[in-house]
Image: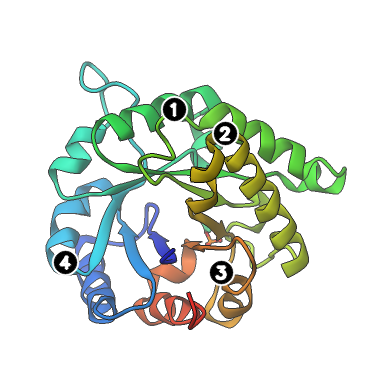
Amino acid sequence: MRPLIAGNWKMHGSLRDAGVLAEGVRAGGAGARAELLVCPPFPYLVPVGGALGSDVALGGQDCHAAAKGAHTGDVAAAMLRDVGASYVILGHSERRADHGETDSVVRAKAEAALAAGLTPIVCVGESEAQRVVGEAEAVVTLQLDGSLPEGFAEAGGVVAYEPVWAIGTGLTPTEVEIAAMHATIRANLEKHFAAAGAKLRILYGGSVKPGNAKGILALPHVDGALVGGASLVAGDFLAIAAGVPDAA
Ligand code: PEP
């Protein structure tokens, strides 16, 4: 499967910054071994989509579970699709923390994304305290069981393993720990979706940088990366994408 390198721009930058960054990423899109995806803040989706061209995909950072309605401040999956998005990040730990999103909320959002023709990227990951007491795999398994909707595999849904303590901290699990968690996630996907689960992409996210990307991306069942901070510098984002193994 073609690896996916996704940039989560979060709530950073100005319109001008977004345009410059998109232009920089565009340059690396054509002929990249990995599929490239950029997820800007909502107000910048249209100009960034225009600047990215057709070789880099566009995604949202969230959507509402309802198709439409009285939900002030929210965005429907169909609206994302309408402005050219093909992916949406769901259940990011910052949304789980800032907005109290539970697994069932994430699952409802993923259903809405599928109904609108978007590919959901469902984020899971343990806290530092959960890892310290040896609960990381159990926590992630519960999150997967609660967050993945029917139809996820048919639509080529993506899972992103993002240990909360590794996001934006410069810390990462060891490669052995990442490989072990990704094997657990693969087994869970196969439990839910049988053979189709073997073909779904599992991204690693949490302080991926040009310096550690190559090693992480070479691990079994690591099918790409979800990148926060390093996606705000086009050269770093493209250097991470260049770390995808040749044979991939
Ligand atoms: C993220 O927020 O999805 C993320 C992985 O951030 P960072 O790369 O900055 O750790």
Q: Which mark is residue 208?
A: 3
Under circle 3, the secondary element is: loop
- Label 3 vs label 4: CA separation? 25 Å
Are dots 4 and 2 in contact, CB under 8 Å? no
- Horizontal side of 79 relative to 161 (left or right) equals left
CB atoms at circles 3 and 4 under 8 Å apart?
Answer: no
Of helix, strand and loop, which one carries label 2? Answer: helix
Which class describes the residues within 10 Å of circle 3: few (<14), some (14-19), or many (20+)? many
| Residue 66 picture location, percent across and down | 29, 21
**Amino acid at pointer 1:** Glu
Q: What is the three-letter code of the residue carrying label 2?
A: His
**Residue type of the residue flagged with mark 4:** Ser
Q: Residue furthest right?
A: 133
The disc placed on residue 245 is none
Of residues 142 and 42, the one nearer the viewer is 142
Badge number at residue 192:
2
Point out the frontmost of discs 3 and 2.
Answer: 2
Residue linked to disc 4: 54
Foreground: disc 4 or disc 2: 2
Instruction: Identify the residue at image location x=28%, y=41%.
Output: 118
Question: How many C-alpha atoms fall within 10 Å of the one at disc 1: few (<14), some, or many (≥20)?
Answer: some
Report helix, strand or loop for mark 1.
loop
Determine the secondary structure under disc 4: loop
Name the residue beneath numbered marker 1: 150
Looking at the picture, tell me which residue is in the foreground, 53 or 187: 187
Q: Is residue 43 left or right of residue 102?
A: left
Q: Earlier in the sequence, mark 3 or mark 2?
A: 2
N-term-proximal mark, 4 vs 2: 4
Cα gap from disc 4 to disc 1, whole angstroms? 30 Å
Classify 10 Å Cα crowding around label 4: few (below 14), some (14-19), many (20 and above).
Answer: few
Distance from disc 4 to disc 2, alpha carbons, whole Å, reads: 33 Å
